[in-house]
Amino acid sequence: MTSNRDQSPIADHTHVKLPHQGRADQDRVQRDEVDRQHTHPTRPTDDVSPARRRLPDRTSFAVVVAALILVFVGSGTPVPLYATYRREFGVSSGDLALTTVIYLAVTAAALLILGRLSNVLGRRPVAIAAVICAALGVLVLLRVDGLGPLLTGRILQGLACGTATSALGTYAVELAPPRPTWAGPVVAANGPAFAIPFGALLSGALVQYAPQPRHLIYLLVAAALVLCAVALVFCRDTVQRTAGVRAALRPRVQLPAGQTLAVIAVSGGLVATWSLSGFFQAFSPTVTVDQLGSTSAMLAAVVFASIVVLSPVGGALGGRLLAPRALALGMVVFALAAVVIVTAVHTASTAALLTASLIGGMALGIIGGAGMRIMLTGAQPEQRAGIISTVYLISYSGAAVPGLIGGQLSHVWDVPRLATGYGALVLAAVAVGLTSLALHQRRSTRRHP
Protein backbone atom coordinates (compact mmCIF):
# COMPACT_ATOMS: atom_id res chain seq x y z
CA MET A 1 0.00 0.00 0.00
CA THR A 2 1.38 3.41 -0.95
CA SER A 3 0.36 6.89 0.09
CA ASN A 4 0.62 10.45 -1.15
CA ARG A 5 3.25 12.52 0.58
CA ASP A 6 1.05 15.54 1.10
CA GLN A 7 -0.34 15.74 4.62
CA SER A 8 -4.03 16.34 5.18
CA PRO A 9 -4.65 18.63 2.18
CA ILE A 10 -8.31 18.96 3.01
CA ALA A 11 -7.59 20.30 6.44
CA ASP A 12 -5.04 22.75 4.98
CA HIS A 13 -7.62 24.42 2.77
CA THR A 14 -11.01 24.12 4.35
CA HIS A 15 -10.51 26.58 7.20
CA VAL A 16 -9.23 29.68 5.39
CA LYS A 17 -10.69 32.89 6.83
CA LEU A 18 -11.35 35.63 4.29
CA PRO A 19 -12.16 39.20 5.37
CA HIS A 20 -15.26 41.06 4.23
CA GLN A 21 -17.04 37.87 3.11
CA GLY A 22 -20.12 36.09 4.35
CA ARG A 23 -20.14 32.45 5.28
CA ALA A 24 -21.59 31.39 1.90
CA ASP A 25 -18.84 33.29 0.04
CA GLN A 26 -16.17 31.72 2.25
CA ASP A 27 -17.53 28.23 1.58
CA ARG A 28 -17.61 28.85 -2.15
CA VAL A 29 -14.01 30.13 -2.29
CA GLN A 30 -12.79 27.33 -0.04
CA ARG A 31 -14.56 24.71 -2.17
CA ASP A 32 -13.13 26.08 -5.41
CA GLU A 33 -9.62 26.22 -3.92
CA VAL A 34 -9.78 22.59 -2.79
CA ASP A 35 -11.23 21.39 -6.10
CA ARG A 36 -8.62 23.34 -8.10
CA GLN A 37 -5.85 21.40 -6.38
CA HIS A 38 -6.81 18.14 -8.10
CA THR A 39 -8.90 19.19 -11.06
CA HIS A 40 -6.46 21.56 -12.74
CA PRO A 41 -2.89 21.22 -11.54
CA THR A 42 -0.03 21.94 -13.87
CA ARG A 43 -0.78 20.31 -17.19
CA PRO A 44 1.13 17.11 -17.90
CA THR A 45 3.59 17.08 -20.78
CA ASP A 46 1.93 17.65 -24.12
CA ASP A 47 1.56 14.90 -26.66
CA VAL A 48 4.90 14.06 -28.24
CA SER A 49 3.46 13.10 -31.66
CA PRO A 50 3.19 16.44 -33.50
CA ALA A 51 2.90 14.80 -36.92
CA ARG A 52 -0.70 13.77 -36.29
CA ARG A 53 -3.34 16.46 -36.02
CA ARG A 54 -4.95 16.50 -32.58
CA LEU A 55 -8.43 17.49 -31.48
CA PRO A 56 -8.85 20.51 -29.16
CA ASP A 57 -8.88 19.60 -25.48
CA ARG A 58 -12.57 20.38 -25.06
CA THR A 59 -13.43 18.09 -27.97
CA SER A 60 -11.05 15.46 -26.63
CA PHE A 61 -12.76 15.68 -23.23
CA ALA A 62 -16.12 15.03 -24.91
CA VAL A 63 -14.66 12.04 -26.79
CA VAL A 64 -13.15 10.60 -23.61
CA VAL A 65 -16.41 11.02 -21.69
CA ALA A 66 -18.35 9.40 -24.55
CA ALA A 67 -15.93 6.46 -24.59
CA LEU A 68 -16.17 6.02 -20.81
CA ILE A 69 -19.96 6.12 -20.96
CA LEU A 70 -20.16 3.68 -23.89
CA VAL A 71 -17.92 1.09 -22.25
CA PHE A 72 -20.33 0.95 -19.33
CA VAL A 73 -23.43 1.27 -21.52
CA GLY A 74 -22.29 -2.01 -23.08
CA SER A 75 -22.01 -3.50 -19.60
CA GLY A 76 -25.66 -2.70 -18.90
CA THR A 77 -27.10 -4.05 -22.15
CA PRO A 78 -27.41 -7.75 -21.15
CA VAL A 79 -29.50 -7.08 -18.04
CA PRO A 80 -32.96 -6.76 -19.71
CA LEU A 81 -32.20 -9.97 -21.62
CA TYR A 82 -31.61 -11.99 -18.46
CA ALA A 83 -35.29 -12.98 -18.30
CA THR A 84 -35.04 -14.16 -21.93
CA TYR A 85 -31.93 -16.18 -21.14
CA ARG A 86 -33.72 -17.74 -18.16
CA ARG A 87 -36.73 -18.63 -20.25
CA GLU A 88 -35.05 -19.82 -23.47
CA PHE A 89 -31.70 -21.21 -22.31
CA GLY A 90 -32.35 -22.36 -18.75
CA VAL A 91 -30.04 -19.84 -17.07
CA SER A 92 -31.10 -19.75 -13.41
CA SER A 93 -31.24 -16.81 -10.99
CA GLY A 94 -28.22 -18.27 -9.22
CA ASP A 95 -26.36 -18.41 -12.55
CA LEU A 96 -27.18 -14.76 -13.20
CA ALA A 97 -25.97 -13.78 -9.74
CA LEU A 98 -22.76 -15.75 -10.37
CA THR A 99 -22.34 -13.94 -13.69
CA THR A 100 -22.63 -10.59 -11.93
CA VAL A 101 -20.12 -11.60 -9.26
CA ILE A 102 -17.58 -12.82 -11.85
CA TYR A 103 -18.01 -9.62 -13.86
CA LEU A 104 -17.41 -7.53 -10.72
CA ALA A 105 -14.45 -9.69 -9.65
CA VAL A 106 -12.76 -9.36 -13.06
CA THR A 107 -13.37 -5.61 -12.99
CA ALA A 108 -11.80 -5.36 -9.54
CA ALA A 109 -8.81 -7.48 -10.64
CA ALA A 110 -8.31 -5.26 -13.70
CA LEU A 111 -8.36 -2.18 -11.47
CA LEU A 112 -5.79 -3.70 -9.11
CA ILE A 113 -3.40 -4.97 -11.79
CA LEU A 114 -3.97 -2.63 -14.76
CA GLY A 115 -5.06 0.49 -12.90
CA ARG A 116 -1.68 2.27 -13.10
CA LEU A 117 -0.69 1.04 -16.57
CA SER A 118 -1.73 4.31 -18.22
CA ASN A 119 0.88 6.12 -16.09
CA VAL A 120 3.66 4.51 -18.17
CA LEU A 121 2.03 3.63 -21.50
CA GLY A 122 -0.02 6.83 -21.70
CA ARG A 123 -3.73 7.42 -21.19
CA ARG A 124 -4.66 7.20 -24.88
CA PRO A 125 -3.32 3.71 -25.83
CA VAL A 126 -4.68 2.09 -22.68
CA ALA A 127 -8.04 3.82 -23.21
CA ILE A 128 -8.20 2.57 -26.81
CA ALA A 129 -7.40 -0.98 -25.69
CA ALA A 130 -10.20 -0.83 -23.11
CA VAL A 131 -12.72 0.38 -25.69
CA ILE A 132 -11.75 -2.39 -28.13
CA CYS A 133 -12.07 -4.99 -25.36
CA ALA A 134 -15.56 -3.67 -24.57
CA ALA A 135 -16.53 -4.00 -28.26
CA LEU A 136 -15.33 -7.62 -28.26
CA GLY A 137 -17.40 -8.29 -25.15
CA VAL A 138 -20.69 -7.16 -26.69
CA LEU A 139 -19.91 -9.08 -29.88
CA VAL A 140 -19.48 -12.28 -27.85
CA LEU A 141 -22.88 -11.63 -26.25
CA LEU A 142 -24.40 -11.84 -29.73
CA ARG A 143 -23.84 -15.61 -29.51
CA VAL A 144 -25.40 -16.28 -26.10
CA ASP A 145 -27.20 -19.63 -26.04
CA GLY A 146 -26.39 -20.60 -22.47
CA LEU A 147 -24.25 -19.72 -19.48
CA GLY A 148 -20.85 -20.17 -21.21
CA PRO A 149 -21.03 -17.36 -23.80
CA LEU A 150 -22.74 -15.09 -21.26
CA LEU A 151 -19.86 -15.59 -18.82
CA THR A 152 -17.25 -15.05 -21.55
CA GLY A 153 -18.86 -11.81 -22.68
CA ARG A 154 -19.17 -10.54 -19.13
CA ILE A 155 -15.52 -11.39 -18.39
CA LEU A 156 -14.41 -9.32 -21.40
CA GLN A 157 -16.70 -6.50 -20.28
CA GLY A 158 -15.30 -6.67 -16.75
CA LEU A 159 -11.75 -6.43 -18.09
CA ALA A 160 -12.76 -3.45 -20.25
CA CYS A 161 -14.62 -1.69 -17.44
CA GLY A 162 -11.79 -2.07 -14.94
CA THR A 163 -9.21 -0.75 -17.39
CA ALA A 164 -11.46 2.06 -18.64
CA THR A 165 -12.37 3.17 -15.12
CA SER A 166 -8.77 4.10 -14.40
CA ALA A 167 -7.47 5.13 -17.84
CA LEU A 168 -10.54 6.95 -19.18
CA GLY A 169 -11.58 8.27 -15.75
CA THR A 170 -8.14 9.83 -15.17
CA TYR A 171 -8.03 11.00 -18.79
CA ALA A 172 -11.34 12.84 -18.23
CA VAL A 173 -10.06 14.50 -15.04
CA GLU A 174 -6.96 15.76 -16.85
CA LEU A 175 -8.77 17.02 -19.96
CA ALA A 176 -11.73 18.57 -18.09
CA PRO A 177 -12.38 22.29 -18.71
CA PRO A 178 -11.48 24.77 -15.94
CA ARG A 179 -15.14 25.41 -15.07
CA PRO A 180 -17.01 23.92 -13.36
CA THR A 181 -14.16 22.65 -11.21
CA TRP A 182 -16.09 19.53 -10.20
CA ALA A 183 -16.73 18.35 -13.79
CA GLY A 184 -13.80 15.95 -14.00
CA PRO A 185 -14.31 14.23 -10.62
CA VAL A 186 -18.08 13.96 -11.13
CA VAL A 187 -17.62 12.36 -14.56
CA ALA A 188 -15.02 9.93 -13.19
CA ALA A 189 -17.18 9.05 -10.18
CA ASN A 190 -20.67 8.92 -11.70
CA GLY A 191 -20.14 8.24 -15.40
CA PRO A 192 -19.93 4.45 -14.98
CA ALA A 193 -22.76 4.34 -12.43
CA PHE A 194 -25.01 6.29 -14.81
CA ALA A 195 -24.01 4.48 -18.00
CA ILE A 196 -24.79 0.93 -16.89
CA PRO A 197 -28.51 1.59 -16.23
CA PHE A 198 -28.72 3.84 -19.29
CA GLY A 199 -27.48 0.88 -21.33
CA ALA A 200 -30.08 -1.31 -19.66
CA LEU A 201 -32.86 1.17 -20.48
CA LEU A 202 -31.76 1.41 -24.10
CA SER A 203 -31.51 -2.36 -24.33
CA GLY A 204 -34.90 -2.84 -22.67
CA ALA A 205 -36.57 -0.48 -25.15
CA LEU A 206 -35.03 -2.27 -28.14
CA VAL A 207 -35.82 -5.71 -26.73
CA GLN A 208 -39.42 -4.67 -26.18
CA TYR A 209 -40.13 -2.76 -29.38
CA ALA A 210 -37.41 -3.28 -32.02
CA PRO A 211 -36.65 -6.20 -34.36
CA GLN A 212 -33.88 -8.67 -33.55
CA PRO A 213 -34.23 -8.13 -29.78
CA ARG A 214 -31.28 -10.37 -28.84
CA HIS A 215 -28.86 -8.84 -31.34
CA LEU A 216 -29.64 -5.24 -32.32
CA ILE A 217 -28.48 -3.56 -29.11
CA TYR A 218 -25.15 -5.38 -29.16
CA LEU A 219 -24.48 -4.44 -32.79
CA LEU A 220 -25.28 -0.76 -32.16
CA VAL A 221 -23.07 -0.53 -29.07
CA ALA A 222 -20.20 -2.36 -30.81
CA ALA A 223 -20.34 0.09 -33.74
CA ALA A 224 -20.37 3.12 -31.39
CA LEU A 225 -17.39 1.72 -29.46
CA VAL A 226 -15.38 1.27 -32.65
CA LEU A 227 -16.10 4.89 -33.62
CA CYS A 228 -14.93 6.05 -30.18
CA ALA A 229 -11.72 4.04 -30.50
CA VAL A 230 -10.99 5.78 -33.81
CA ALA A 231 -11.76 9.22 -32.33
CA LEU A 232 -9.45 8.57 -29.36
CA VAL A 233 -6.53 8.21 -31.76
CA PHE A 234 -6.82 11.95 -32.45
CA CYS A 235 -6.99 13.05 -28.79
CA ARG A 236 -3.99 14.57 -27.04
CA ASP A 237 -2.36 12.23 -24.57
CA THR A 238 -1.82 13.84 -21.17
CA VAL A 239 1.01 11.51 -20.11
CA GLN A 240 4.36 10.80 -21.77
CA ARG A 241 5.21 7.17 -22.32
CA THR A 242 7.93 6.02 -19.92
CA ALA A 243 9.63 2.82 -18.79
CA GLY A 244 8.25 0.78 -15.91
CA VAL A 245 5.48 -1.43 -17.29
CA ARG A 246 6.43 -4.32 -15.03
CA ALA A 247 6.32 -2.13 -11.94
CA ALA A 248 2.99 -0.64 -13.02
CA LEU A 249 1.49 -4.13 -13.32
CA ARG A 250 2.45 -5.00 -9.75
CA PRO A 251 -0.81 -4.99 -7.72
CA ARG A 252 -0.84 -2.00 -5.39
CA VAL A 253 -3.50 -0.03 -3.53
CA GLN A 254 -2.84 3.72 -3.45
CA LEU A 255 -4.45 5.95 -0.84
CA PRO A 256 -4.02 9.58 0.20
CA ALA A 257 -1.72 10.05 3.21
CA GLY A 258 -3.00 11.20 6.58
CA GLN A 259 -6.62 10.60 5.59
CA THR A 260 -7.41 7.23 7.16
CA LEU A 261 -10.72 8.31 8.68
CA ALA A 262 -11.73 10.13 5.51
CA VAL A 263 -10.98 7.02 3.45
CA ILE A 264 -13.09 4.89 5.82
CA ALA A 265 -15.92 7.42 5.56
CA VAL A 266 -15.80 7.38 1.75
CA SER A 267 -15.59 3.57 1.78
CA GLY A 268 -18.72 3.35 3.93
CA GLY A 269 -20.66 5.42 1.40
CA LEU A 270 -19.31 3.43 -1.55
CA VAL A 271 -20.09 0.04 0.01
CA ALA A 272 -23.63 1.19 0.82
CA THR A 273 -24.38 2.47 -2.67
CA TRP A 274 -22.63 -0.19 -4.71
CA SER A 275 -23.95 -3.13 -2.70
CA LEU A 276 -27.55 -2.05 -3.25
CA SER A 277 -26.81 -1.29 -6.91
CA GLY A 278 -25.43 -4.83 -7.18
CA PHE A 279 -28.68 -6.18 -5.78
CA PHE A 280 -30.60 -4.35 -8.51
CA GLN A 281 -28.23 -5.57 -11.21
CA ALA A 282 -28.46 -9.21 -10.15
CA PHE A 283 -32.09 -9.44 -9.03
CA SER A 284 -34.08 -6.72 -10.85
CA PRO A 285 -35.44 -9.24 -13.42
CA THR A 286 -36.52 -11.52 -10.56
CA VAL A 287 -38.03 -8.59 -8.64
CA THR A 288 -39.96 -7.55 -11.75
CA VAL A 289 -41.36 -11.01 -12.46
CA ASP A 290 -41.86 -12.46 -8.97
CA GLN A 291 -42.71 -9.36 -6.92
CA LEU A 292 -44.20 -6.93 -9.44
CA GLY A 293 -45.87 -9.59 -11.59
CA SER A 294 -44.58 -8.39 -14.96
CA THR A 295 -42.54 -10.09 -17.70
CA SER A 296 -41.81 -6.79 -19.47
CA ALA A 297 -38.14 -6.38 -20.39
CA MET A 298 -38.66 -2.64 -20.36
CA LEU A 299 -39.98 -2.64 -16.78
CA ALA A 300 -37.05 -4.82 -15.70
CA ALA A 301 -34.70 -2.26 -17.26
CA VAL A 302 -36.53 0.62 -15.54
CA VAL A 303 -36.32 -1.11 -12.15
CA PHE A 304 -32.60 -1.75 -12.62
CA ALA A 305 -31.88 1.76 -13.90
CA SER A 306 -33.88 3.58 -11.24
CA ILE A 307 -31.24 3.17 -8.54
CA VAL A 308 -28.52 5.04 -10.46
CA VAL A 309 -30.00 6.83 -13.46
CA LEU A 310 -30.18 10.19 -11.62
CA SER A 311 -26.67 9.94 -10.19
CA PRO A 312 -25.27 12.67 -12.52
CA VAL A 313 -27.92 15.05 -11.17
CA GLY A 314 -26.89 14.23 -7.62
CA GLY A 315 -23.22 14.62 -8.51
CA ALA A 316 -23.82 18.09 -9.95
CA LEU A 317 -25.88 19.18 -6.93
CA GLY A 318 -23.35 17.78 -4.47
CA GLY A 319 -20.57 19.61 -6.29
CA ARG A 320 -21.99 22.88 -4.96
CA LEU A 321 -21.27 21.81 -1.37
CA LEU A 322 -18.03 21.19 0.48
CA ALA A 323 -17.12 17.55 -0.07
CA PRO A 324 -17.46 16.35 3.58
CA ARG A 325 -20.86 18.02 3.91
CA ALA A 326 -22.05 16.53 0.62
CA LEU A 327 -20.84 13.07 1.64
CA ALA A 328 -22.76 13.18 4.92
CA LEU A 329 -25.95 14.41 3.23
CA GLY A 330 -25.73 11.74 0.55
CA MET A 331 -25.30 8.90 3.05
CA VAL A 332 -28.27 9.97 5.17
CA VAL A 333 -30.59 10.28 2.17
CA PHE A 334 -29.41 6.97 0.71
CA ALA A 335 -30.01 5.12 3.98
CA LEU A 336 -33.58 6.44 4.15
CA ALA A 337 -34.18 5.50 0.51
CA ALA A 338 -32.89 1.98 1.15
CA VAL A 339 -35.42 1.46 3.96
CA VAL A 340 -38.26 2.44 1.63
CA ILE A 341 -36.89 0.20 -1.15
CA VAL A 342 -36.84 -2.85 1.10
CA THR A 343 -40.37 -2.09 2.29
CA ALA A 344 -41.55 -1.69 -1.31
CA VAL A 345 -40.09 -5.07 -2.29
CA HIS A 346 -41.95 -6.70 0.61
CA THR A 347 -45.24 -5.00 -0.30
CA ALA A 348 -44.81 -5.36 -4.11
CA SER A 349 -45.33 -1.62 -4.57
CA THR A 350 -43.94 -0.54 -7.94
CA ALA A 351 -44.52 3.19 -7.35
CA ALA A 352 -42.79 3.22 -3.96
CA LEU A 353 -39.91 1.12 -5.28
CA LEU A 354 -39.23 3.39 -8.26
CA THR A 355 -39.67 6.63 -6.28
CA ALA A 356 -37.30 5.57 -3.50
CA SER A 357 -34.81 4.21 -6.05
CA LEU A 358 -34.73 7.48 -7.99
CA ILE A 359 -34.12 9.46 -4.79
CA GLY A 360 -31.47 6.93 -3.79
CA GLY A 361 -29.85 7.36 -7.20
CA MET A 362 -29.45 11.09 -6.62
CA ALA A 363 -27.89 10.36 -3.22
CA LEU A 364 -25.59 7.84 -4.88
CA GLY A 365 -24.36 10.59 -7.21
CA ILE A 366 -23.73 12.94 -4.31
CA ILE A 367 -21.73 10.27 -2.46
CA GLY A 368 -19.71 9.29 -5.51
CA GLY A 369 -18.77 12.85 -6.48
CA ALA A 370 -17.96 13.96 -2.93
CA GLY A 371 -15.95 10.81 -2.26
CA MET A 372 -13.90 11.28 -5.42
CA ARG A 373 -13.18 14.91 -4.54
CA ILE A 374 -11.98 13.90 -1.07
CA MET A 375 -9.77 11.11 -2.39
CA LEU A 376 -8.21 13.19 -5.19
CA THR A 377 -7.51 16.34 -3.21
CA GLY A 378 -3.80 17.13 -3.47
CA ALA A 379 -3.04 14.13 -5.70
CA GLN A 380 -0.23 14.51 -8.22
CA PRO A 381 -0.76 13.49 -11.88
CA GLU A 382 1.12 10.20 -11.42
CA GLN A 383 -1.03 9.37 -8.36
CA ARG A 384 -4.49 9.98 -9.82
CA ALA A 385 -4.84 6.73 -11.78
CA GLY A 386 -3.88 4.68 -8.72
CA ILE A 387 -6.27 6.54 -6.43
CA ILE A 388 -9.18 6.34 -8.89
CA SER A 389 -8.46 2.61 -9.25
CA THR A 390 -8.59 2.27 -5.46
CA VAL A 391 -11.92 4.10 -5.28
CA TYR A 392 -13.45 1.70 -7.77
CA LEU A 393 -11.74 -1.31 -6.23
CA ILE A 394 -13.57 -0.48 -3.01
CA SER A 395 -16.78 0.08 -4.98
CA TYR A 396 -16.69 -3.16 -6.95
CA SER A 397 -15.66 -5.17 -3.91
CA GLY A 398 -18.62 -3.62 -2.09
CA ALA A 399 -20.86 -5.00 -4.82
CA ALA A 400 -19.10 -8.31 -5.53
CA VAL A 401 -18.81 -9.73 -2.00
CA PRO A 402 -22.49 -9.19 -1.07
CA GLY A 403 -23.40 -10.40 -4.57
CA LEU A 404 -21.51 -13.65 -4.05
CA ILE A 405 -23.23 -14.24 -0.73
CA GLY A 406 -26.60 -13.19 -2.12
CA GLY A 407 -26.22 -15.49 -5.10
CA GLN A 408 -25.68 -18.48 -2.82
CA LEU A 409 -28.55 -17.47 -0.52
CA SER A 410 -30.89 -17.03 -3.51
CA HIS A 411 -31.22 -20.82 -3.64
CA VAL A 412 -32.89 -20.85 -0.21
CA TRP A 413 -34.06 -17.24 0.35
CA ASP A 414 -36.77 -15.42 -1.55
CA VAL A 415 -36.21 -11.92 -2.97
CA PRO A 416 -37.84 -9.98 -0.07
CA ARG A 417 -35.57 -11.70 2.43
CA LEU A 418 -32.53 -10.98 0.25
CA ALA A 419 -33.60 -7.34 0.01
CA THR A 420 -33.77 -7.16 3.81
CA GLY A 421 -30.21 -8.46 4.06
CA TYR A 422 -28.97 -5.89 1.58
CA GLY A 423 -30.84 -3.14 3.43
CA ALA A 424 -29.17 -4.12 6.70
CA LEU A 425 -25.77 -3.94 5.00
CA VAL A 426 -26.55 -0.45 3.69
CA LEU A 427 -27.49 0.82 7.15
CA ALA A 428 -24.36 -0.67 8.72
CA ALA A 429 -22.07 0.80 6.04
CA VAL A 430 -23.68 4.23 6.37
CA ALA A 431 -23.29 4.13 10.15
CA VAL A 432 -19.57 3.38 9.79
CA GLY A 433 -19.20 6.10 7.17
CA LEU A 434 -20.95 8.81 9.16
CA THR A 435 -19.07 7.96 12.35
CA SER A 436 -15.70 8.05 10.58
CA LEU A 437 -16.56 11.31 8.83
CA ALA A 438 -17.53 12.96 12.14
CA LEU A 439 -14.26 11.83 13.76
CA HIS A 440 -12.29 13.06 10.74
CA GLN A 441 -13.95 16.48 10.86
CA ARG A 442 -13.38 16.74 14.63
CA ARG A 443 -9.71 15.88 14.21
CA SER A 444 -9.32 18.42 11.40
CA THR A 445 -10.94 21.10 13.56
CA ARG A 446 -8.56 20.40 16.44
CA ARG A 447 -5.56 20.66 14.12
CA HIS A 448 -6.80 23.87 12.51
CA PRO A 449 -9.09 25.68 14.97
Image: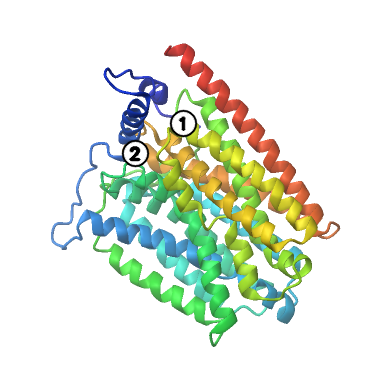
Amino acid type assigned to the residue bearing label 2 in the image: Glu
Residue drawn where x is 52% and y is 42% of the image: 367
Residue 2 marker: 1
Label 2 element class: helix
- The reply to whether residue 338 is in sight is yes
| Residue 203 x/y as whole percent | 54, 73
> In the image shown, does 398 or 240 lie closer to the viewer?
398
Mark 2 packing: few (<14 Cα in 10 Å), some, or many (20+)? some
Residue drawn where x is 36% and y is 32% of the image: 31
| Residue 387 x/y as whole percent | 44, 39
> In the image shown, does 97 or 15 lie closer to the viewer?
15
Amino acid type assigned to the residue bearing label 1 in the image: Thr
| Residue 42 x/y as whole percent | 23, 37
Give the left or right position of residue 402, taking residue 203 as reference: right
Residue drawn where x is 53% and y is 26% of the image: 260
* Displayed quadrant of residue 39: top left
- The reply to whether residue 149 is in sight is no
Q: In the figure, 81 relative to 116: above or below? A: below
Toward the right, the furthest residue is 412
Residue drawn where x is 27% and y is 64% of the image: 233
| Residue 270 x/y as whole percent | 57, 42
Toward the bottom, the furthest residue is 211
Calculate the distance from the C-alpha at mark 1 to the C-alpha at mark 2: 12 Å
Label 1 element class: strand
Q: Which residue is mark 2?
A: 382
Q: In the figure, 80 relative to 108: above or below? A: below
> In the image shown, does 190 or 129 lie closer to the viewer?
190
Are discs 1 and 2 less than 8 Å apart at CB? no
Please report whichever mark, 1 or 2, sits nearer to the chain's N-terminal start: 1
Q: In the figure, 177 relative to 332: above or below? A: below
Mark 1 packing: few (<14 Cα in 10 Å), some, or many (20+)? few
